[in-house]
Image (spheres, rainbow, N blue to C red):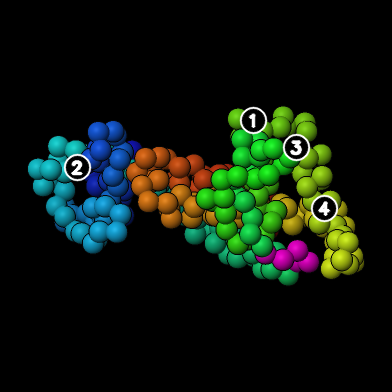
Amino acid sequence: MPIKRAELQPGDLVFFNTMGRPFSHVGLYIGNQQFVHAPSTGNVIRVESIHNSYWVRRFDSARRITAAEAHAVRHLVPLAARAARRLRGSAIPATVQHDDLQPSNVVGEGALIDWGDASVAHPFASLLTALSGSSGRPAAEYRSAIQDAYLSAFAGQPDGSLASGPDLDDLREQARLAVLLAPVGRIRAWLRVPGAVEEYPDAVTVWWRRILADPNWDRLR
């Protein structure tokens, strides 16, 4: 939620133009007209006055998570823990998953590029970006078939490691839980890349709101 500088409260994000473009630097307001920030990658974290002339000239705006959003996040924490426990008990183990599986990251005979967002997680988490959005993604009527094609590869393995593994319905349920939690990985990916949030200040907010709006949480209550 955008707010004015005079309305700042501890915990608000403050954005500045320090590189000739809006929102190129971000800090966290801590009260008493001060904010904490990292001046540059690898530099010492500082506490500075928001009334310092340098920052006054470069101030862009501030953002705050709403009270309703904060309440919703707290309410979803035990549900997320429940989903994670179910996935840990599944037959499909965690592995390196791409986390940005989309047509533009597939080349040649199916080779995957751009592994910068990858993480160790449930392999079905990659379905979040594979089937979400619109840029180059399959139309809605094809997504169920594409998901099932992806999942069927995990129904049994030639070496027998999953010979008595879950059927397709079980895999679909695991996919639902993995995709439900996958935006957390997307948020972590944005936060771990130096300068990413400064350049794309709404990236984390988009994924948080995706988490809050997902109707599949109701099936875990």
For label 2, the residue is 6
Secondary structure of residue under mark 3 = helix
Q: Residue at x 25, y 38 (%)?
A: 19
Q: Which residue is mark 1?
A: 136
The residue where tag 4 is placed is 153
The residue that appears at 37% across and 40% down in the rendered structure is 199
Amino acid at circle 3 = Arg
Is the C-beta separation of discs 3 and 4 under 8 Å? Answer: no
3 or 1: tag closer to the N-terminus: 1
Query: As shown in the figure, which amino acid type bears the numbered disc 4?
Result: Ala
Compare marks 3 and 2 and give the one earlier in the sequence: 2
Question: Does the residue at mark 2 contact the one at mark 4 (Cβ under 8 Å)?
Answer: no
Cα separation between marks 2 and 4: 56 Å
Which numbered disc, 2 or 4, marks the residue closer to the eye?
4
The CA distance from mark 3 to mark 1 is 13 Å
Disc 1, SS: loop
- What secondary structure is found at the residue carrying circle 4? loop
| Magenta stretch in the rendered image | 90-94
- Label drawn at residue 143: 3
Nearest to the observer: residue 31 or residue 188: 188
